[in-house]
Image (spheres, grey):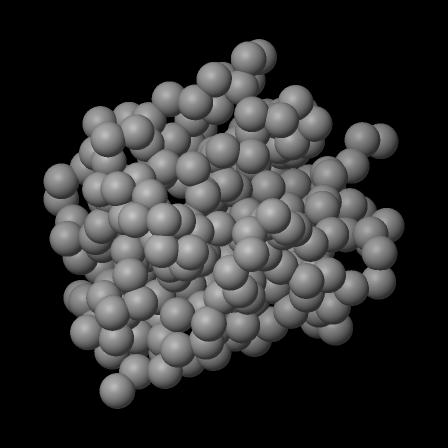
Amino acid sequence: MELLKFATGNAKLSKRLIFSLPAGYSCPNAGVCKTFADRTTGKITDLPQYSGTDADEFRCFAAMAEVRPNVREARWHNWDLIREAIYSTESDTKKQLNVLTGVIEMSLAVQPALDLVRVHESGDYYTELYMHAWLNAARNFSNMQFYSYTKSLGMWYNLRKYIPKNMYFTASWGGVLDSMISQYPRTFKRHARVVYTEQEAIDLGLEIDHDDSHCLGDKPFALLVHGSQRAGSDAMAVLTQRKKAGEFVGYNKSNQTKPVTLTTV
């Protein structure tokens, strides 16, 4: 039986299991960051930017990795396998949930012995059934901690009673459901906003996270814009200025400026 593919860390994150789906295609509630990489060529396409939020515009950080064929192949493999697991079962939601949960659990069982799992470096929860399957798997792997950034806030809210203690969701600003973050503060107490500068984070009263440690906390935080941004965008202009100043522009081995941990004042 084919199993899902996981990575173990990346340029930003230390050793942990990382699961991904294709960027954009699996992100039904993305707004300012909806970016696609063509499955065959890896060519990047940005959708017109969504104006229904006050979040800063930026290109999806994870999508740019899909210009590499091996990354694209792994993410599409996962999405194909998940959809096959669902649709090869009779149109019985309970059976589909059980089958998909089983696929996730069997795939986790053969991974390296790491106790932290990031669900979706790329991609998002695209149906409630799919999110529910991850909740079931997390509950059954109680010795591990699972976490996700997500813009699928409606699904999160609907399934909030099923979320086990070892699954941590962070609401990601910049989607079509941003208003829910303020509307339901008890549910979405942990949320993240992409900022262009350290000063912007300080003005918002937010600490900047550089290693996903805030995803296991209980308060909102900021993420500093990085990576390859759309030509002509405000995000690209900011990164160009930061690069000229010798400041942090991305998480990679060639970057000579280490991120600075900032505290709010």
Is the N terminus in the top left, top right, bottom left or bottom right quadrant? Answer: top right
Residue at position x 55%, y 48% from top?
121
Look at the picture and state if 233 lies above or below 145: above
Look at the picture and state if 207 lies above or below 47: below
Horizontal relation, residue 1 to residue 132: left or right: right
Could you tell me how many numbered marks the image carries? 0
Horizontal relation, residue 40 to residue 185: left or right: right
Q: Where does the image place residue 99, in percent across and percent down from the top left?
A: 68, 40
Query: In which image quadrant can residue 203 be found?
Result: bottom left
Q: Where does the image place residue 81, in percent across and percent down from the top left?
A: 67, 29
Q: Where does the image place residue 92, in percent across and percent down from the top left?
A: 56, 35
Query: In which image quadrant can residue 16 be found?
Result: bottom right
Residue at position x 62%, y 26% from top?
68
In front of the other: 251 or 123: 251
Residue at position x 53%, y 19% from top?
42
| Whether residue 51 is visible | yes
